[in-house]
Image (cartoon, rainbow, N blue to C red):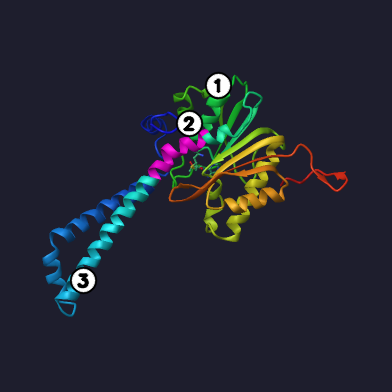
Amino acid sequence: MGKTGRDWTQIYAIYGVDDWQTPLFLLLNAVGFSLLSVAFLLYFEPICFFLQHFLPGPASARFAAGFSGSVTALSAVCLFFAATNFFYSAVSLHWEMSQRIVSLVPDWSSVKHALDLGCGRGILLNAVALQLKKSGSSGRVVGLSPARPQARTGSPSPNLTLRTAGLEGVQEYVTCRPGDPRTLPFSDRYFDVVVSAAFVHTVGKEYGAKSAAAAAERMRVLGEVVRVLKAGGVGVVWDLVHVEEYVQRLNELKMEEIRVSERVTAFMVSSHIISFRKPCQHFVGSAEVRLDWR
Ligand SMILES: C[S@@+](CC[C@H](N)C(=O)[O-])C[C@H]1O[C@@H](n2cnc3c(N)ncnc32)[C@H](O)[C@@H]1O
């Protein structure tokens, strides 16, 4: 049972795992390295004997065999840990973080339009929809799905996302809309709330995650989030690695109440939740100005 009172097997049964190839790859490697380290243990003497053909003296052969066996065992442990962390991050942690994200919006009952950027299979999307349902709101949440199906990353289709909404009993609160997060297909100041989970860091990855071009793409996404938010609207983004640069960008965009959560290890890297509010008015000096949110 997770901290949020929901059984992880139930979450897994509904959503499965986005990018399941990664934990599977890690698990297979972990099993391979485990078998190798067991072989080192069982056949230590024959391995030492074999290594003596290449190394000077039995002592160095025993050292080489012992060292290789230890490194293999250590690698197996690290790979098991990584596979478990990926699996935990994709299912149980994802659900818990989604609950935390929705809890950062002070009042769901007044929310008419919410957006989930990069909705995937809909863990966060449905958490928002459940919140709308619980608060008795007449609001709806839109999930942004890729403009084109991404066979390479196994991106889920909008149909699959809507199916998970059906399984959670919130299908009437949810729609999916294909689009590019860098040029969102929505008008200015449309949403009361914009949320996103483990998505923004994926934008621009094709340029290399650490490149200036990828950083510029991520900044464009944040600019779009701010553009589509209503004045006084709330944004909550849970993301990996690049959080400092988001805070800087949100400050440049003159967002208010920017808050960053403590560090949470997800998918083997650091992650944080950032929440902020779009100001009702923006003043520079004595004259009111409207920012170009793009
Ligand atoms: C790690 S998952 C995020 C999961 C999701 N936020 C959730 O709460 O379940 C990343 C998702 O981003 C989606 N994605 C990738 N490129 C996208 C794009 N250009 N526009 C919208 N979504 C995209 C993929 O479908 C993928 O499932």
Residue at 39% over, 46% down: 85
Callout count: 3
- Residue 134, which numbered label? 1
- Residue 58, which numbered label? none
Decide if ligand 1 comes within 8 Å of the CB at mark 1.
Answer: no
- Residue 63, which numbered label? 3
* Residue occupying the far front of the picture: 262
Estimate the x, y position of residue 207 in percent, counting from the top left: 54, 58
Spatial separation of the CA atoms under disc 3 and disc 2: 57 Å
Q: Is residue 60 found left or right of 5 in the rendered image?
A: left
| Type of amino acid under label 1 | Lys
Q: Secondary structure at mark 2?
A: helix
Disc 3 residue crowd, few under 14, some 14–19, many 20+, Cα 10 Å: few
Estimate the x, y position of residue 193 in percent, counting from the top left: 64, 34
| Type of amino acid under label 3 | Phe
Q: Is residue 124 found left or right of 3 in the rendered image?
A: right
- Of pointers 3 and 2, the one earlier in the residue sequence: 3
User: Which residues, given as a range, are shown in magenta?
Assistant: 86-99
Q: Quadrant of the N terminus?
A: top left
Residue at 36% over, 47% down: 23
Asked whether 50 or 146 is in front, the reply is 50
Residue 93 drawn in magenta: yes
Spatial separation of the CA atoms under disc 2 and disc 1: 24 Å
Asked whether 122 or 263 is in front, the reply is 263
Q: Secondary structure at mark 1?
A: helix
Q: Secondary structure at mark 3?
A: helix
Spatial separation of the CA atoms under disc 1 and disc 3: 64 Å
Estimate the x, y position of residue 235 in percent, counting from the top left: 63, 39
* Residue occupying the far top of the picture: 136
Disc 1 residue crowd, few under 14, some 14–19, many 20+, Cα 10 Å: few
Q: Which residue does the numbered mark 2 point to in the structure image?
A: 159
- Of pointers 2 and 1, the one earlier in the residue sequence: 1
